[in-house]
Amino acid sequence: MRVSIARVLLSSIILFACVSSRKVTELEITNVWARPTPKESSMAAVYMRVTSPVADELLAISTPLARSASLHVAGESDSDGGEGHDNHGGADSEMTMSDAEMVLGPNSTVELGPGGLQVMLEGLERPLVEGESFELVLTFREAGDREVNVFVSTNEPID
């Protein structure tokens, strides 16, 4: 009898772990894009939609294209039409978060867009050119590292 109870308990734990990890892998990152930048700009903003079936939190952001990448809340004066930002200071760490956080509740979606929450790239290695794409890595507490391609366009892509 004790063996049967132990097996049922162990099976339940394994099943719960499988269901939980499956849900974490279902985190979706869509509509990932950035506007082209002038060649003299060293900053750019990245926009996207993040949907998670479980509670999660964005811990870090990185890209080989910029010295730093951080979560940022843009005010109306920060809206730049893709021409770069003059009023942001640089951060030395490649994976430093500043100004904002992204905490997702279960079954929630967070929109990053112009004039609001966005990923700020500082210290660009080169300008962003219309039609190209580049890699961005988002690190979540539960979902782990998620690599996405950022499409450079003057208009938001439609999924």
Image (tube, grey):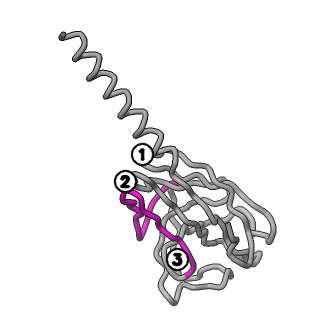
Percent position of residue 67, x then y: 60, 59
Find residue 99 and report its image quarter. Answer: bottom left
Percent position of residue 97, x then y: 45, 61
Dot 2 corresponds to which residue? Answer: 55
Q: Nearer the viewer, mark 2 or mark 1?
A: 2
Amino acid type assigned to the residue bearing label 2 in the image: Ala
Which comes before the other along the chain, label 2 or label 3?
A: 2
- 31 in relation to 115, above or below: above
Which comes before the other along the chain, label 1 or label 3?
A: 3
- 110 in relation to 9, above or below: below
Question: Which secondary structure lies at badge 2?
Answer: loop
Whole-number angstrom distance, CA of label 2 to CA of label 1: 8 Å
Whole-number angstrom distance, CA of label 1 to CA of label 3: 30 Å
Dot 3 corresponds to which residue? Answer: 88
Dot 1 corresponds to which residue? Answer: 142
- Magenta stretch, main secondary structure, is loop
Q: Which residues are magenta?
A: 94-114
Disc 1 crowd rating (10 Å Cα; few below 14, some 14-19, many 20+) is some
- 142 in relation to 17, above or below: below
